[in-house]
Structures are given as C-alpha cells and as structure tokens.
Amino acid sequence: MDLWFESALLEDGWADRVRFRLADGRIEAVEPGVEPDAGDERHFVALPGLPNLHSHAFQRAMAGLAEVRGRADDDFWSWRELMYRFVGRIGPEECEAVAAQAYAEMLEAGFTRVGEFHYLHHAPDGSRYDDVAEMSGRIVAAAESAGIGLTLLPVFYAHGGFGGQPAGAAQARFLNDVEGFAGLVERAKAQLPPDGVIGIAPHSLRAVTPQELRVLLPIADRGPVHIHIAEQMKEVVDCLAWSGKRPVRWLLDEMPVDRRWTLVHATHVEADEVAGIAASGAVAGLCPITEANLGDGLFPAAKFMAQGGMIGVGSDSNVRIDAAEELRLLEYGQRLTRRARNVLAGEDRPATGARLFDAAVKGGARSLGVETGLAAGRPADIVSLNRDDPTYAERKGDALVDSWVFASRAGIDCVWRGGVKRVEGGRHRRRAAIEARYRTALARLMA
Ligand code: NGQ
Ligand code: ZN
C-alpha cells in the first residue's frame, strides 16, 4: 500500500501533500504536491526513521534498579559492578526476550535501526555455547521479532585494563582471542537478514591491546568500527599513565580513524581531539540519557558541530528509550553549562530540534553503514507524527520537529521499517506478545 502525508521532511527539505510509493521494503518513488489516491493510507507528517547507533539491549532489564545509592562514592564503576551481577543471570532466552522488548520500544520511540554493541557472547562462566554464535543469533531473532533494522557489532574484549591487564571473572562471558572472534563474526554475518549490516566493536582501549586492534581491523572489511572511548576521567588518567596520551589522541595518532568509525561517548576531549575527530569523518556516538544517568560528563557538542563534526545518538544502557529525549538532553546539557539558548542550532538551520534530528539521521546512517532519509531508493523507514497530539497545533515545517523534540508527550503515531508498519497509534503491533515474553524472562531473572 502507498502512503500519503500532509507534509514530509524529505531528503532535500519539506514538501506538502506527498505520496510515497513503496516496493520491496524501499521507497520506490516520492511524489510531492499530489492529491491522495483512493487506496492510499493517509497520515499527518512524515519524518525519516532515526538510527539508534549504540545499544546494550540486555541492560534494559535493569532499568530503574540502579538508582539507589550503594555507597557514598557511587559512580560509573559501582554501577558497572551492579551491571556485571546482572550479566551473570542472562541466558539466551532472557537475552532474546529483553532485546525484543527494548527493540519494540525503540520503534515506538521513532528509532528504525539499532547498532547493537553486543558482548554477551558466552555462558556466564566463559564456556562456549554449543553454537558459539548462540547469543548473537538471539539478538538477530529479537530484531526480527520487533522488526527493527539491525547493525550487529560483535564486541572484541580480551583484557581488564590498559596494557593487556587480565580480565576479571565477571568479564568471562565477553572474552575471545582474535581467531575466535573472527570465527564469531563469520557466523554472526551468516545469521543476518538481507538488510542486516555487520561491523566490529573493539570494546575500549581498556579491553584490547594495540597489536590486537591492528589485526582486528581487517575483519571489519569495509563495515563499521565502533569503540567506547574517553567516557570517564579514570579512563583518561589510566590511558595517560599507560601511553602518555589521552585516549582519543592515542586513537587518532595510532589507528586509521575515518568515516567508518564511531567513537562512542568521546566525552573527555581537548580542543585538538575535537578537531581531530571532526576532520577524520568519524561519528561521535553520543548517548545523552545514559551519559547523564552514569555521571559521565558532557561532550563539547557545540565546538564539534561547528567544525563539521558528525554526531549520532544512542540509547546505550536503555535506562529510558526515547529518541526525542536524547536530542533534547543533548541540547539541554549545552544550555545548562553555557547558560545560553539554542546552542546547537546551525547557521543554515536555526531550528534546534530539526537541526539535531537531521544531524543524527545522517550521522546515525554513516555510523551504522546504511542509507536513510526520505528519497527514492532508500529503505522505507518512516515515522509519522501523531495528529491528535495538540502540541502540533498550527505548526509547520521545522517547528513540527522542534515541537516533537522539546514539547510532545505522545508525539508519534505510526512507524514503518522496511516498508512494513510496525507501530500504529504509538504502540508496537506485536507489543502484547513481546511484553508477555519479557515479563516471563524478568520473573526468572529476578527470582
Ligand atoms: C558497557 N557501558 O560495555 O556496557 C559499558 C560499561 C565498561 C557504558 N560504558 C562497561 N556506558 O565500559 O567497561
Ligand atoms: Zn556502551
């Protein structure tokens, strides 16, 4: 069935009265300025689906459970201990059930593709499952069940700190040597659906040595390379002690960082590092909700974007899954620290929410190795705004996106991914079944 919208944010700007002809999961043709056909489904406003470039789906199961002070100096590292206790309880069924729930919520929020930074590879004691790619298969199954696009980023993890320190017992599930990892990536690639993308994710400079990183890169082929970097000051301090350089500086100097790369967080960066990332074409993978939740710090987004740096957003710990809120918080962090308004608006695009949305669609696509945007030939990944939300009354063009990002509560109506309607009336069409399975998995996890 073809879709008709009162207005649509197309690749080359806003257009009124637009029909999208769909075929094989793609937009076959865009027809602006037309009346709807009798057979067209009619909707309000079309936006392109937003890529979610960084997720650890399993962490959705602990959302809201880490908001209790454990000790006086509660911080990222004590949160990680709690998270590792959860890690030990997640089997294949729990992994799939929790991921499917997270992915259904992502679609409801307007995300149409997820970059799953996947590191729960083995059984809790580190022993291999009969199928070494069992857990990545579960991620693939969860994405299929929810109907979200998947860029799978199998994580390479081998050490517990800079300079090849041994990993701890709680990290046993994550560990591979380079050969084992190459086999895992091969198997994971074979599990993917036709529009799936595979990349690689060396976890962090804490978890991989320079030698390992160099031999890993060819495994990515031309696909995405994602790495956590400079999220916490302890990581910067430890990296300086190990190499004499800050993490991002080290990476830019030692590795062929280019537009295939996503630097997740990159929170603690100095001016030369900001300029270096921007010039490399790598995407800064920002996760504002999680970074606030974990007390990470604030990425200098205004300076970075002013130098042409590409950004995208990720829901990371999935403590709350909300695309509009990621963009809003990204801007609000800048406002609160700079005591100014509309900090991330552009010269060319004064509407802040619309500018951030556009940047995150483009950066997210680069990061996840896909094409997005509403244009002929692109995947039919489309989000429609909810006409019944009074927030949108008398809004047009970029003011609609600003109102979604900054003001709406029930902002989304329908979401299509690969030409199939997955969300209707703000609810995932398979929500009941996915949620029932999630609740059963949680009962087992928490027992
Ligand atoms: C992760 N998450 O891999 O899930 C990490 C925590 C680590 C975030 N950094 C573990 N937000 O970085 O060592
Ligand atoms: Zn992460």
Image: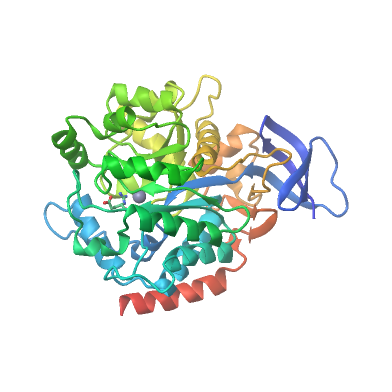
Instruction: Give coordinates of residue 434: x percent, y percent.
Output: 53, 71
Q: Residue at x 33, y 36 (%)?
A: 266
Compared to residue 359, the image places residue 183 above or below, namely below
Q: Tell me how many marks there are.
A: 0
Q: Residue furthest left?
A: 72
Instruction: Give coordinates of residue 249: x percent, y percent.
Output: 28, 29
Location of residue 225 by image quarter: top left
Nearer to the camera, 383 or 155: 155
Q: Residue furthest right?
A: 38
Q: Residue at x 50, y 76 (%)?
A: 436
Residue 261 is left or right of residue 294, and the answer is right
Q: How is the image coloured?
A: rainbow
Residue 14 is left or right of residue 269, and the answer is right
Nearer to the camera, 155 or 330: 155
Instruction: Give coordinates of residue 331: x percent, y percent.
Output: 41, 35
Quadrant of the rendering where the C terminus is positioned: bottom left
Residue 318 visible (yes or no)? no
Compared to residue 361, the image places residue 428 above or below, namely below
Quadrant of the rendering where the N terminus is positioned: bottom right
Q: Residue at x 36, y 79 (%)?
A: 444
Nearer to the camera, 308 or 326: 308
Residue 9 visible (yes or no)? yes
Q: Residue at x 79, y 51 (%)?
A: 2
Compared to residue 159, the image places residue 399 above or below, namely above
Instruction: Give coordinates of residue 359: x percent, y percent.
Output: 52, 33
Residue 378 is left or right of residue 321, and the answer is right
